[in-house]
Image (cartoon, rainbow, N blue to C red):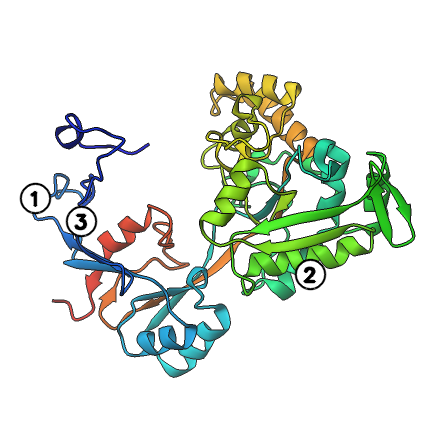
Amino acid sequence: MRVMPKHIWENQDPGAFTFNPPVYTGPYMLQEASSSKLYYLWKKNPNYWNKANLDPRPEYVIYQQSGPVDTQVQEFLSGNLDMAHQGVGFDYLNQQVVETQYDQTIRFDFPDPCPRGMYFNAESPSGLFATPEGRQAVSILLNRDVIGTTIWQPPSRPATIPWADYEAWNAWATPEITSKYDLSYSVDRANQLLDGPGSTRDGEIRTLNGQPLQLSCITPVPTTGLEYQIASNLATSAREAGVGIAVQSLPGSAFGDAFATGGYDLTSHWLCGMQFDPNQLYRGFHSRNYFPVGERANQGGDAGNTRFRNAELDAVIDKLDAADPTDAAARPIFDQGLDLFMAQAPAVPIIQTIYPMMFNTAYWTGWPTADNPYTIPATWWSHFLFAIGSLQPASGG
């Protein structure tokens, strides 16, 4: 939900109004944007309505398109870059190099709320994901241990529930339910599950409905991205089960278009939704969010793009929509929701997401740290505003 200024919008045609410059509720106003130098420059609003509670010290904040990693390293070492993180190509190994040359750094290996995950198109061209067996089979072809220790940097750990393994959130992962679902890597078990939807194996090739099983896996990152590498690792494993997977890098709007219109079999990106209770994740998979393949899904978020429909899960979601997550009496229905979600597997977690975030302390101090994780330290979460609001000049001035 975006809070919009009534005094600006009330007499405008929303289909034509460009809303430039934008006016929102935060402590900064857009000062300048450059389409050639690829940056946004924000200036502090002296008349900010909530100044008594949030009065950031930085007068300006600039967000700039990330460049080549060697350029970013030099900018950081020169004090021209205050923050570096893996999400913009400043990877873990280069951060380690910087730390050997520069002592004005703080690094926070931040556990993101969204595990890396895969979504399955229930109405995919292959037909494999029309049944839970097909989705579960691909899930156990993911070698989560190898992916977490050899692909992801810094090394991570397998994700066995569809949200981050925060201590506070582990209470939703009832052991009696999670223990029923073994997500460990197994080609043999995958082959058994793949036989369930009626596919057959002829030598190295598996077919379904008379057609070779050749899947399209889309990812929004470039071919150098870790999510692309995760998908490539799956493709290698899937060949052992007779399934071909073509991995496609679709950065920007190309991914969104293919995902929203159902032009894919599975994805490799991130599994988000859980914030306070699991139904925030589940409700995106409700059949009320269904659109046929070819039509653009416009509700339910990422989950709505899966074309997944299950009447039993719908009924549980409807009950959870009216349930109080703090009420112990509601716990059995939450457990039922987790059980159904794990059994149906419309999307699956892969590994916990660890992002190495490195901050420059040459000019600003007060960044979030592992010892003081007072807010989410990643720029793509709106919470990062509170990191900006907590900064103090390094000189004390």
Secondary structure at badge 1 equals: loop
> What residue is shown with label 1?
47
**Amino acid type shown at disc 3:** Tyr
Q: The N terminus lies in which quarter of the figure?
A: top left
Point out residue 88 in the picture as x, y percentages from the top left corner.
Answer: 42, 62
Relative placement, left or right, of 130 versus 258 is right
Residue 176 visible: no
Which residue is at 54% across, 16% downward? 319
Disc 1 or 2, which lies upstream in sequence? 1
* Residue 396, quarter of picture: bottom left
* Number of other residues with Cα within 10 Å of mark 2, as a class: few under 14, some 14 to 19, many 20 or more: some
Calculate the distance from the C-alpha at mark 1 to the C-alpha at mark 2.
52 Å
Point out residue 300 in the picture as x, y percentages from the top left corner.
Answer: 49, 30
Disc 2 or 3, which lies upstream in sequence? 3
Relative placement, left or right, of 145 versus 322 is right
Q: Give the total of numbered labels.
A: 3
* Number of other residues with Cα within 10 Å of mark 3, as a class: few under 14, some 14 to 19, many 20 or more: many
* Number of other residues with Cα within 10 Å of mark 1, as a class: few under 14, some 14 to 19, many 20 or more: few
Residue 395 versus residue 315: which sits nearer the camera?
A: 315
Residue 362 versus residue 216: which sits nearer the camera?
A: 216
Residue 351 versus residue 8: which sits nearer the camera?
A: 8
> What residue is shown with label 2?
146
Disc 1 or 3, which lies upstream in sequence? 3
Calculate the distance from the C-alpha at mark 1 to the C-alpha at mark 3.
10 Å
Relative placement, left or right, of 102 versus 34 is right
**Amino acid type shown at disc 1:** Asn
Q: Residue furthest bottom?
A: 101
